Image (spheres, rainbow, N blue to C red):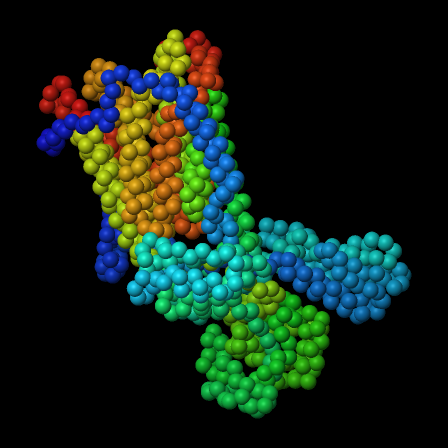
């Protein structure tokens, strides 16, 4: 238990030195650290929103409404198919899909064939290549057909709607102009938006929460695009070009009443033109949108129409030919990425359901600063008291334990800043608590050594037995705290997770310091003492 | 390097004779059972003061920009909005005020509308320090996950202790845990302290800490069981508790010191969180000495178990 090979000593010391080096940047201001050469470790702890101030907004997408919209669109499509194929029947909603009752049972084979063409293969990543489809068409009786939306189809639709919605939210938060916003998907239908340093959350929420509005407008026949906004005239109004578009800074003069609205768009995807191989965006309208768009494009061949998202003109492609079937493509010298972005924006503009704030947590910067100050004060006082207590109770060995504690604290800070875990207020509490509890490992060992000494053992064997016997107990007791921390991590939102993270990191570092660092210090100390005299007096 | 001074430590606690913990076991068990019943009764009759995490609704902390906050005026302004139950209280200093508005009917959007109304009613004289708005879907999810988290922790700990020790130890440990959790909840109900997600995190930490304590005592009991095969069980338990007493007290003390520092100096935001943990450490220490071990004496333990696993005659350890 008390022999350390030189290799071990070097490794343990190297880890301690690394802990110091990687923790050091946290003791300097951000400006100072930035001026350091790049090869010096310069990662600082990132502070959670509760410490630096900021907004945490959890948005919820209404999946039921999404499903209802899918069924509504499906009913339109089914009706259109039947009309196109001159099949008479009544189509109505049922749970999870629609039901069609044919007027003439003789149409059944034809109806089944045409309706089965509606079903699209589902591409859910893992199922790629499988022949699963988004719809199931079944004959119920000689007149009745059920067209049901499969779960896979719903999941795919939710996935599309979510990626579109996340894109929209990101675009809007970026437009808000704060540093380092974090936008992540949570679960199947939630979006978490974390924006540091925001004070006026009301305006942020308004910006994010307004319904994404995609519209198609006709362009004024003579004054299409200009460098300055013109005053509204008659039915026409100026719309700015989007900052991402090629015409950024310019203004389009458009008819204010849209030709087609985004909620009439059924899908949009990036693809390639079959002839020219140039990136395009292909899109499909629902029945209503298709009709309006067919009429508009027939009347406006070779004239531009404008695609407007949230009041900004994304692009103004020219109608090359009438688009009658409800689907078409937008081309216009896009790069693949630009086409893909625009497709996502079109999809998100077509977002059929609102985002609602399901949870909001905001901390003002003054409270954040106060929390850091009071957390630090509590930490300094708590840790100082622990240090005094430990040295008072265990003397020189207590001093070794305190050195271990300090290395422990530095290790936690170093690990958290290098890996990039976020420090929260409960995280500070976890850190302080870990320091208080980390002494436990040393206490177990030292109390055991005292007992063995009292039982008449020599210094060397008492220390040896103390470390050996206590080890099992240390593992046992720390493992249970670790289990609680894991469950907490799973349970928690931001701040609580911070607590769980510091607690679990602290468990490993405190086992490491007690079992290796402090034991090594004591082993080295013992070696020196034994050179001085045969009878070592244990200062404990 | 040979100048490291020899400093002797001090005994935190010294007693010439063994303390007869087992003698107190009867009154302690009765006291604990009474405390559990009382806690459940409090919980059932007064309920818990659930925070927005579990109840939904909004919580807004504001600080007056000049001078002390006028709580009466705030109460009138916010009360006039007709948002149902509204609690307004001073929070830490006389400039800080905490406003709580109950969950509004009408889903997530209604909470947001209520928040906007309250913020405009408060006016310009106050700075927003903190806002927490939780809608009905999230709060019901958090209630479920909170409950599952506590149950999962208890089950995980039962399995762990059962796996490492005999089943009697697992029962002792778990009864001690449930004891700690229920009495802590009872105190939260009695004092009507806010019970939220961070309180659950504190409860989970208490679970970890309390079982930690129990495991240390159990480890020693098991070791002594191997060493002293003929000793009467109550006497052996008593000896084990006495042997681990110094450690139990010292660890509790260092943990308590840092927690008290957090409670007193750590600020209003985590005061309830640190209170739960201070209380939990005290009750956890008590329960591993006065609940878990005496329970073992009552359940009885198979004495000769070191050899069974190896299928060889037991050897003195």
Q: Is residue B47 above or below residue B13?
A: below
- Look at 18% across and 28% down and name the residue there: B9
Assign the C terminus of chain A to one quadrant of the image.
top left
Q: Work out whether residue A205 can be spotted.
A: no
Q: Nearer the viewer, residue B220 or A253?
A: B220
The quarter of the picture where residue A72 lies is bottom right
Q: Nearer the viewer, residue A533 or B181?
A: B181
Q: Which x, y percent locates residue B91?
A: 36, 54
- Look at 30% across and 66% down and name the residue there: B66
- Look at 62% across and 79% down and name the residue there: A258
Assign the N terminus of chain A to one quadrant of the image.
top left
Q: In this view, does A250 lie above or below B66?
A: below
**In this figure, what is the number of numbered marks?**
0
Q: Which x, y percent locates residue B11?
A: 21, 25
Q: Work out whether residue B244 can be spotted.
A: yes
- Look at 50% across and 89% down and name the residue there: A230
- Give the left or right position of residue A407, taking residue B212 as reference: left
The quarter of the picture where residue A331 lies is bottom right
Q: Which x, y percent locates residue A84?
A: 79, 70
Q: Is residue B241 above or below residue A498?
A: above
Q: Which x, y percent locates residue B200?
A: 45, 43
- Give the left or right position of residue A136, taking residue A66 as reference: right
- Give the left or right position of residue A346, taking residue A16 as reference: right
């Amino acid at each position: 238990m008390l022999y350390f090979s030189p290799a071990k000593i070097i490794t343990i010391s190297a880890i301690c030195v690394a802990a110091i080096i990687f923790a050091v940047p946290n003791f300097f201001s951000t400006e100072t650290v930035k001026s350091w050469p790049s090869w010096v470790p310069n990662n600082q702890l990132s502070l959670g929103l509760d410490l630096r101030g900021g907004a945490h907004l959890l948005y919820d997408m209404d999946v039921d409404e999404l499903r209802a919209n899918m069924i509504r669109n499906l009913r339109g499509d089914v009706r259109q198919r039947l009309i196109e194929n001159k099949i008479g029947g009544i189509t109505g909603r049922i749970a999870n899909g629609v039901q069609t009752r044919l007027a003439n049972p003789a149409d059944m084979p034809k109806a089944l064939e045409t309706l089965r063409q509606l079903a699209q293969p589902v591409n859910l990543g893992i199922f790629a290549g499988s022949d699963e489809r988004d719809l199931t068409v079944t004959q119920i009786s000689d007149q009745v057909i059920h067209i049901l939306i499969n779960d896979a189809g719903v999941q795919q639709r939710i996935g599309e709607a979510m990626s579109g919605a996340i894109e929209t939210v990101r675009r809007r938060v970026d437009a808000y102009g704060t540093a380092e916003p974090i936008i992540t998907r949570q679960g199947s239908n939630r979006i978490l938006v974390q924006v540091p340093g925001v004070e006026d959350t009301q305006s942020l929420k308004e910006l994010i929460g307004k319904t994404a509005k995609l519209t198609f407008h006709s362009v004024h026949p003579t004054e299409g695009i200009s460098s300055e906004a013109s005053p509204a005239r008659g039915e026409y109004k100026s719309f700015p070009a989007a900052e991402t578009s090629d015409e950024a800074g310019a203004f389009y003069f458009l008819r204010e009443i849209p030709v087609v609205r985004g909620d009439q768009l059924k899908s949009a995807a990036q693809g390639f033109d079959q002839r020219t191989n140039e990136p395009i965006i292909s899109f499909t309208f629902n029945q209503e949108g298709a009709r309006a768009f067919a009429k508009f494009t027939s009347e406006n061949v070779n004239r531009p129409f404008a695609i407007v998202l949230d009041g900004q003109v994304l692009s103004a492609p020219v109608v090359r030919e009438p688009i009658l079937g409800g689907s078409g493509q937008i081309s216009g010298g896009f790069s693949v990425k630009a086409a893909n972005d625009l497709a996502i924006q079109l999809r998100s503009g077509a977002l059929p359901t609102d985002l609602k704030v399901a949870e909001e947590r905001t901390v003002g910067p003054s409270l954040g600063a106060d929390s850091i100050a009071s957390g630090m004060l509590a930490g300094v006082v708590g840790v100082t008291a622990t240090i005094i207590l430990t040295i008072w109770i265990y003397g020189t060995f207590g001093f070794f334990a305190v050195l271990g504690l300090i290395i422990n604290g530095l290790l936690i800070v170093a690990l958290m800043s290098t890996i990039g875990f976020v420090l929260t207020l409960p995280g500070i509490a976890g850190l302080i608590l870990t320091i208080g509890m980390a002494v436990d490992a040393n206490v177990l060992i030292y109390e055991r050594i005292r007992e063995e000494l009292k039982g008449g053992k020599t210094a060397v064997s008492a220390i040896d037995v103390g470390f050996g016997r206590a080890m099992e107990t240390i593992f046992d007791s720390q493992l249970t705290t670790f289990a609680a921390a894991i469950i907490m991590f799973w349970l928690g939102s931001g701040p609580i997770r911070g607590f769980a993270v510091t607690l679990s990191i602290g468990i490993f570092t405190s086992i490491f310091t007690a079992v290796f660092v402090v034991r090594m210090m004591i082993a080295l100390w013992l070696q020196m003492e034994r050179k001085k005299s045969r009878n070592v007096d244990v200062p404990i | 390097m040979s100048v490291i001074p020899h400093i002797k430590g001090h005994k935190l606690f010294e007693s010439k004779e063994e303390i007869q913990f087992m003698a107190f076991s009867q009154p302690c068990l009765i006291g604990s059972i009474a405390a559990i019943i009382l806690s459940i009764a409090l919980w059932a009759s007064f309920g818990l003061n659930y925070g927005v995490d579990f109840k939904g609704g909004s919580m807004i902390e504001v600080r007056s920009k000049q001078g002390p906050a006028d709580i009466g005026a705030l109460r009138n302004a916010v009360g006039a909005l007709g948002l149902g139950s509204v609690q307004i209280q001073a929070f830490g200093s006389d400039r800080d005020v905490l406003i709580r508005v109950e969950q509004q009917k009408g889903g997530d959007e209604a909470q947001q509308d209520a928040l906007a109304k309250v913020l405009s009613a408060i006016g310009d004289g106050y700075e927003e320090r903190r806002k927490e708005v939780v809608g009905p879907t999230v709060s019901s999810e958090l209630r479920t996950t909170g409950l599952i988290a506590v149950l999962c922790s208890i089950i995980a700990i039962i399995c762990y202790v059962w796996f490492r020790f005999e089943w009697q130890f697992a029962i002792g440990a778990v009864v001690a845990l449930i004891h700690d959790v229920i009495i802590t909840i009872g105190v939260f109900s009695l004092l009507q302290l806010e019970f939220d997600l961070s309180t659950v995190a504190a409860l989970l930490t208490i679970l970890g800490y309390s079982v930690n304590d129990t495991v240390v005592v159990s480890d020693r009991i098991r070791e002594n069981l191997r060493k002293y095969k003929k000793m009467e069980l109550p006497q052996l338990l008593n000896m084990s508790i006495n042997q681990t007493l110094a450690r139990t007290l010292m660890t509790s003390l260092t943990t308590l010191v840092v927690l008290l520092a957090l409670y007193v100096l750590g600020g209003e935001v985590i005061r309830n969180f640190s209170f739960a943990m201070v209380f939990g450490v005290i009750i956890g220490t008590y329960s591993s000495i006065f609940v878990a071990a005496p329970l073992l004496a009552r359940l009885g333990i198979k004495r000769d178990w070191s050899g069974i696993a190896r299928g060889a005659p037991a050897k003195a350890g």
